[in-house]
Structures are given as C-alpha cells and as structure tokens.
Image (tube, grey):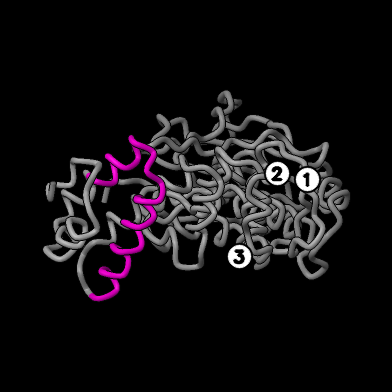
C-alpha cells in the first residue's frame, strides 16, 4: 500500500512515497518498520530519504527519525550502521549518546571503525558504568575511559522511541541569605575561567535565548555572588560531586533551543572548568588524580536569587582558600523569547 502503513510495501511503493515527498506517510512507515522490527527496511528508508533530502526534498525528518530509531532500538549490527559523520544532525540528541543507552561497548566495538566517533561512544558507555578496553581507541577528549573514585554518578539522558528526558540534578536546598551589597573583594580578570564557562553553556547562549555571567574576585564566595548584583542571594555549600553533576549536565545540554551535545562532552566541560579554576589549562591533559585534587581543594556552593526555579539554570559559586580567589557563575536559558 502506498500510504506507508502496510509493512509489506515494495521498493517501488517506497520510491513513490519519496518521489511525491509524502513526509507524513514516510513517518508512518518509520513507525511501522520500527514496530515490526524491520531493521533492514528502516535502514533502506533512511538511506533513500537522506539521498532525496540531499537533492532538495524536505525529507530529512523521516531520515533523522529512522536513524534515531535504529541507533536506539535496533540490534548493534544495524545501530552501528548509522554512526557515520553526517548522521544525527537533526536528532534530539547525538547518536553517539543515543546508541550508548541500550548497546554495550563490547557489542559495538567489533562493528565500528575505532575513530573519534567511536571514542565518543566509548566515553558514553563509561558514563553508564562500563569498563572499556582502551587498546586502539583514540584519545578524543583527554579524559580517561573509566570513572574516577572522586567522580559522582552523572545525570544522564533517557531516550524513548518518541522523545527524551534531560533531567537536571536535584536542586540543592536553599541556604543562608548573602548581603548582596557587600563587595569587599577586588574584581580580578580571569579570562580562562570566563572562556571555560562560556564554552560549557555555549548552546544556551549561541543557539538559544540564554546568557552567562561570570565574575572572579579577591575574596570570598559572598563577595563573588554580591559582585553579580542579584536582587537577592541565598548561598548553600555543596559537595564537589554535586557541583560536577551540575557542570556536566549544563555542558551536555542544549538548553531551550540549542543542540544537545551529549554526556561525554558534558563531562569534558566539567573537567576543563576545574582545570581553568586551578590555572592548569595549559597543562592539559592533566592526570585524573590531578583533576580530582584540584576539584576537591575548592569549596563549592549553589546560590539562587530566592525566585522559583524555571528553565535552565546554573548558579554556582566557588572559592579557593589557598589562592584567596572566588568565582560566581550565573547562566540561564528559557524557551520564552
């Protein structure tokens, strides 16, 4: 049947759907082939729709949906075939992250070329607790292919057939009020930390409606938060692990309208910011032990402006007692123009 609902369509019928750019019927056919587990047919649909899209036909939603379903639901043999350089451009998450949800590295590694894309898949599996044999894997991020004892359990995306959930870490309890008029410490120019934060939330600010403010002061976290001049400020101390959860979540997120980058890049962004706070970015890659020491030598805080939580927010304050410096970060995004 040419309406794309049969599950027994012929190549000529699929050609007819593509020829008349019947996107609705193609999406229904993606659903049918997913339900019947016709992975070969789904891959064929993806390839044909992608070729048609390259000629100007607006069929990329069908191609993107087909490769997303293959990466998430198909056996590893079929899933691996959509992990090429041009895949996932319009997916709700990077396919290197999608495929890692339901497929082990052991299943995938024998099917992938061990290139940087495979390295990202391996890092995503590391974040899901898998032990990875790093032989022949490229060093794509300067991060170890194993979680460190000082790292937290990161908050990961959860993909389903129709959608995805990108939950933030649990919001810390509200703390004590800070005198927002207190700015005792002198402002310090710290371009490395400013750049690291801006890179962390770049999809929020460059592809969406977000903004990011970062200050560094000679003084305490109270001075740093006050330097942002918020309407109110409540400050609560958090663990290093909690701070890393928030940083990695922000780095993985696309915010309201930006493209999600995935948990592997989120973890990298968190580590890179720690290196910047320790003045050690020029020494990258640092040893995992070295990054852990830098992170645990800092004092971490969550602050908020005593307003209801909304949208995407990252409001951290960090103090280095040994350096006498403190930083405050205020980054946010919203789907409201």
The region drawn magenta spans: 29-55
Q: Place residue 192 in its image quadrant.
A: bottom right
Looking at the image, which residue is at 33% across and 35% down? 35
Looking at the rendered image, the disc whose residue lies closer to the viewer, 1 or 3, is: 1
293 relative to 42 in the view: left or right: right
Residue carrying label 3: 195
Q: Are marks 1 and 2 in contact (CB under 8 Å)?
A: yes
Using the numbered discs, state the Cα–Cα distance from disc 1 to disc 3 in whole angstroms.
27 Å
288 relative to 91 in the view: left or right: right
x and y percentages locating residue 6 in the rendered image: 19, 41
Mark 2 Cα-neighbour bin, 10 Å: few <14, some 14–19, many ≥20: many
Element assignment for label 1: loop
x and y percentages locating residue 7 in the rendered image: 25, 41
Using the numbered discs, state the Cα–Cα distance from disc 1 to disc 2 in whole angstroms.
6 Å
Looking at the image, which residue is at 60% across and 62% down? 117
Looking at the image, which residue is at 23% across and 48% down? 27
Disc on res. 322: none
Looking at the image, which residue is at 58% across and 47% down? 263
Front residue (pair 53, 211): 53
Front residue (pair 76, 55): 76
Q: Residue furthest bottom?
A: 55
């Amino acid at each position: 049947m040419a309406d794309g609902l049969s599950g027994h369509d012929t190549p000529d019928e699929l050609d007819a759907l593509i020829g008349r750019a019947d996107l609705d019927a193609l999406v229904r056919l993606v659903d049918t082939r997913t339900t019947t587990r016709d992975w070969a047919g789904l891959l064929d649909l993806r390839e044909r729709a992608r070729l048609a899209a390259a000629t100007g036909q607006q069929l990329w939603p069908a191609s993107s949906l087909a490769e997303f379903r293959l990466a998430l639901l198909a056996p590893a043999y079929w899933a691996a075939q959509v992990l090429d350089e041009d895949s996932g451009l319009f997916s709700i998450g990077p396919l290197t992250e999608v495929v890692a949800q339901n497929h082990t590295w052991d299943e995938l590694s024998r099917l992938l070329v061990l290139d940087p894309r495979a390295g990202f898949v391996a890092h995503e599996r590391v974040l899901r607790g898998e032990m990875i044999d790093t032989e022949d894997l490229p060093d794509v991020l300067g991060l170890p292919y194993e979680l460190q004892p000082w790292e937290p359990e990161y908050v990961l995306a959860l993909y389903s057939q129709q959608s995805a959930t990108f939950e933030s870490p649990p919001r810390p309890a509200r703390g004590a009020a800070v005198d927002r008029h207190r700015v005792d410490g002198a402002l310090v120019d710290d371009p490395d930390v400013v750049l690291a934060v801006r890179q962390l939330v770049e999809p929020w600010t460059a592809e969406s409606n977000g903004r990011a403010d970062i200050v560094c002061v000679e003084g305490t976290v109270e001075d740093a938060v006050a330097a942002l001049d918020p309407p109110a400020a409540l400050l609560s101390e958090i663990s290093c692990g909690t701070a890393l959860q928030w940083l990695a979540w922000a780095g993985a997120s696309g915010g309201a309208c930006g493209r999600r980058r995935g948990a592997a890049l989120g973890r990298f962004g968190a580590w890179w910011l720690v290196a910047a706070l320790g003045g050690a970015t020029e020494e990258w890659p640092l040893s995992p032990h070295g990054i852990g020491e830098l992170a645990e030598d800092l004092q971490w805080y969550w602050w908020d402006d005593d307003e209801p939580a909304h949208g995407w927010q990252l409001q951290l304050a960090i103090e280095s007692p040994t350096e006498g410096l403190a930083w405050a970060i205020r980054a946010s995004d919203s789907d409201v123009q």
